[in-house]
Amino acid sequence: MSAFRQHRGHAFRTSSRLALALAFLFAAGCATTSGADPWEKSNRKVFAFNEGLDRYVLEPVAKSWDWVVPELVQTGIRNIFDHANRPLVMMHNLLQGKPYDASVDLVRFTANTIFGLGGLIDVASMDGMARNEEDWGQTLGVWGVPEGNYVMLPLFGPSTVRQTVGLAADSFSAPYSYYIPIWGTVVTTGTRLLNARAFYLEEIQQSREDAFDYYLFVRDAYLQNLASKLNDSTELESEDDDDLYYFDDEETDSGKGDRDRGL
């Protein structure tokens, strides 16, 4: 077995054990308050920090990105990241006991690899194929790990105890982390998040203006979406892979919805 395969196998086993151990450890104390927000006071402080960072740093950079990078290229970047993550999604569907969804992931990955220029073009969505979105947080939920309290994470945004544990495990499971150095992973993750922020410029701005309490809006939208994903009741083409304050990609007003189907 090559050194690369040994490293990959060790990293996967580590992420799996980390997810299970931490989930049961943290969720044990939150089993009776699933989705509740007893930490609202501190969560609001973190939320205010995130909002300030977004307004004065991320949003201006995202606007520049949106102005400089053509829409076609932005869509291609998003497709590439989704394509790279597809084997991991397939694995989670198998772990959750959903072989049919896993087979859809396999067909999607194969089709986009062969006919979509290695994932640059999402030909599978063009053909109406469902895009499943699974992660460690959802898998732990299917396995019976309690959701725990709602928590606002610095930089990462809304989460729950279980999803936070899943996020840590996901970071070890990212496919591209095995092929590039740490600094490359940072650049790659930054590009993905910046590209995602550019996708939601209009939606976030409109929600900030319309919401009576934007904190509550973000919290409720996140928890509802999380419950929907866990219950497998999402829309056929719901794509919340970026978890950017949770906006569905039914962007009818902005005109960006069509680009999520492919180039």
Image: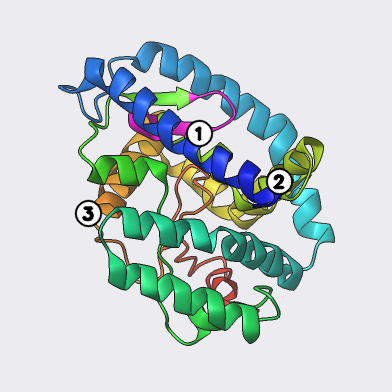
Is 157 magenta? The answer is yes
Residue on which disc 3 sits: 231
Task: Identify residue type, mark 1.
Answer: Thr
The verdict on residue 197 being magenta is no
Residue type highlighted by circle 3 = Asn
Where disc 1 sits, the SS reads: helix
Q: In the displayed structure, does residue 23 sit left or right of residue 181?
A: left
Residue 155 appears anywhere in the view: yes
| Above/below status of 236 relative to 20 | below
Q: Going by the picture, which residue comes out furthest to the top?
A: 41
Question: Residue at 48% of width from left, 39% of height from top?
Answer: 13
Tag of residue 48: none
Q: Nearer the viewer, residue 74 or 30?
A: 30
| Residue farthest to the left, as pictured | 32
Q: Name the residue beneath numbered marker 1.
A: 14
State how far apart marks 1 and 2 are (Cα): 16 Å
Q: Residue 247, image x and y in percent?
A: 45, 52
Instruction: Work out how far the residue at label 2 is from the one at label 3, CA to CA, in angstroms.
Output: 39 Å
Residue name at image x 23 percent, y 42 percent: 143
Judging by the rendered image, the residue that carries numbered circle 2 is: 3
Q: Position of residue 113 (x, y in %)?
A: 63, 78
Mark 1 and mark 3 lie on one chain; the one further toward the N terminus is 1
- Residue at 73%, 47% (x, y): give it: 188
Q: Secondary structure at mark 3?
A: loop
In this picture, which residue range is highlighted in magenta? Answer: 153-163
Instruction: Mark 2 vs mark 3: give the one in front.
Output: 2
**Outermost residue toward the right in this view:** 68
Q: Quadrant of residue 25?
A: top left
